[in-house]
């Protein structure tokens, strides 16, 4: 295995293993469910962990292993584990770290399904959950109880792009013996590496920037070998949200252009955010690349760029917000982010429809809030489409 000090090189070469006698440039897809043992003893040794080698693809697969090795290099952790979806990674992490009677501190703003898991499934299993503003260090400290085992956050957070200070959360975790987990989906390791700030477990929906082409649903966890092995041998093995070798191959292919794509997403988003902020039909733009955004102060310190996702409110009614979205010609009406195509969605109707009306208000999600995941098109074309949409509602 080979590793550079430069992440651009590591997205291409980092963690790549030699793959047998033919020396293929592209990682082979080991499309196999099981692996053959030479004899009973070899099988016994592999089960006992005394010998290297594969057993069965839910426990490990060479193509998936390579993606994991590559992600560990990019996130600067000892190890990584791949999953069949981002939510598979969230649930495997949470159920490996928490049991009945334990307490979780998390953010009052979260990815919609993560919120549903924490707000509905965990309490039903006897796990206590506190939703607090993780950007407010005093609020986090005040929420700590003797049985607090995990602090879980995302930064920037869906959908208003609130930024959490990673150093502060990691310091609280270390000082109190609480495991910290951070969803890094919006930034990718190109723009932010939470483990380098002391976060214990870094999570990705690999469906988004890592794969980048809108053709895979997948998840990743990165952390210490001890924690990752524990998750692989408990909740991943026994709950079974594994990644297929073919999907692992697609994500590996996506990683090779990650640095180029993320840079372009960020550049485009900055131009589009400035355009929207200057537009008379727009009430407010939420994007950490704008100096007015509260998260802007952490640009440079923990984030190397503001990323490709923003949110904005149109002036006017819910119906006008909906009419604007329906009027768009090039931007695609779709949830997800990190794809080549610019994607636009309405959180109150879509990603955050798992929230009750009062929970939406509490999370600051208005009915005119729109999320834009800026794509890789020419920024002029993205702005022209938004412009004709805004003109159609009188903007
Ligand atoms: C999409 C997403 C998830 C869930 O990932 P899936 O791959 O859809 O299961 C979790 N967190 C964030 C921030 C996401 O954007």
Image (cartoon, grey):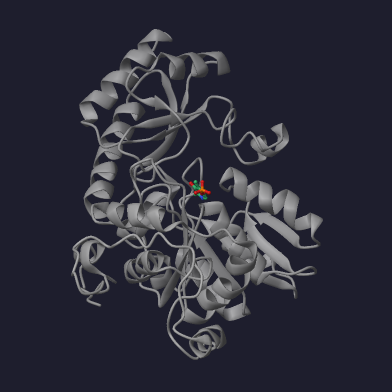
Query: Quick check: 176 above or below 57?
Result: below
Q: Nearer the viewer, residue 334 or 137?
A: 334
Would residue 376 appear left or right of 159 to someone viewing this image? left
Residue 292, quarter of picture: top left
Would residue 187 be visible to someone looking at this image?
A: yes
The quarter of the picture where the N terminus appears is: bottom left
Would residue 93 appear left or right of 127 to someone viewing this image? left
Q: Position of residue 199 (x, y in %)?
A: 48, 70
Residue 222, quarter of picture: bottom left
The residue located at (37%, 63%) in the rendering is 30
The residue located at (50%, 19%) in the rendering is 321
The residue located at (23%, 31%) in the rendering is 379
Query: Quick check: 319 above or below 48?
Result: above
Q: Position of residue 226 (x, y in %)?
A: 52, 81
Query: Quick check: 8 above or below 35?
Result: above
Q: Position of residue 278 (x, y in %)?
A: 32, 26
The residue located at (57%, 31%) in the rendering is 350
The quarter of the picture where the C terminus appears is: top left
Q: Nearer the viewer, residue 97 or 263?
A: 97
Would residue 172 be visible to someone looking at this image?
A: no
Would residue 14 appear left or right of 322 to someone viewing this image? left
Q: Position of residue 316 (x, y in %)?
A: 52, 16
How many numbered callouts?
Answer: 0
């Amino acid at each position: 295995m080979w590793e550079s000090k430069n992440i651009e090189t590591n997205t291409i070469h980092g963690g790549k293993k030699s793959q047998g006698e033919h020396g293929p440039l592209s990682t082979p897809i080991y499309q196999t469910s099981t692996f053959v043992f030479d004899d009973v003893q070899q099988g016994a040794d592999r089960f006992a962990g005394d010998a290297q080698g594969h057993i069965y693809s839910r426990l490990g697969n060479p193509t998936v292993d390579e993606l994991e090795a590559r992600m560990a290099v990019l996130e600067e952790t000892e190890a990584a584990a791949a999953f069949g979806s981002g939510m598979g990674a969230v649930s495997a992490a949470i159920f490996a770290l928490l049991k009945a009677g334990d307490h979780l501190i998390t953010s009052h703003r979260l990815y919609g399904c993560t919120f549903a898991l924490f707000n509905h499934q965990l309490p039903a299993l006897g796990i206590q959950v506190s939703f607090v503003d993780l950007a407010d260090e005093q609020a986090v400290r005040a929420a700590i109880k003797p049985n607090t085992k995990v602090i879980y956050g995302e930064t920037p957070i869906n959908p208003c792009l609130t930024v959490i200070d990673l150093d502060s959360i990691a310091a609280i975790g270390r000082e109190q013996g609480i495991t910290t987990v951070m969803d890094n989906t919006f930034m990718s390791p190109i723009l932010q590496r939470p483990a380098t700030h002391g976060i214990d477990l870094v999570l990705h929906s690999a469906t988004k920037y890592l794969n980048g082409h809108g053709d895979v649903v997948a998840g990743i966890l990165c952390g210490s070998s001890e924690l990752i092995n524990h998750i692989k041998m408990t909740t991943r093995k026994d709950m079974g949200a594994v990644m297929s070798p073919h999907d692992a191959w697609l994500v590996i292919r996506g990683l090779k252009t990650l640095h180029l794509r993320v840079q372009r997403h960020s550049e485009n988003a900055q131009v589009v955010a400035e355009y929207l902020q200057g537009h008379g039909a727009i009430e407010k733009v939420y994007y950490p690349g704008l100096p007015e955004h509260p998260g802007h102060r952490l640009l440079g310190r923990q984030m190397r760029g503001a990323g490709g996702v923003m949110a904005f409110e149109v002036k006017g009614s819910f119906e006008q917000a909906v009419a604007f979205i329906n009027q768009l010609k090039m931007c695609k009406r779709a949830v997800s982010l990190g794809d080549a195509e610019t994607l636009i969605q309405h959180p109150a109707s879509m990603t955050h429809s798992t929230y009750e009306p009062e929970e939406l208000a509490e999370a600051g999600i208005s009915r005119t809030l729109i999320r834009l995941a800026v794509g890789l098109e020419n920024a002029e074309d993205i702005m022209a489409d938004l412009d004709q949409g805004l003109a159609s509602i009188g903007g």
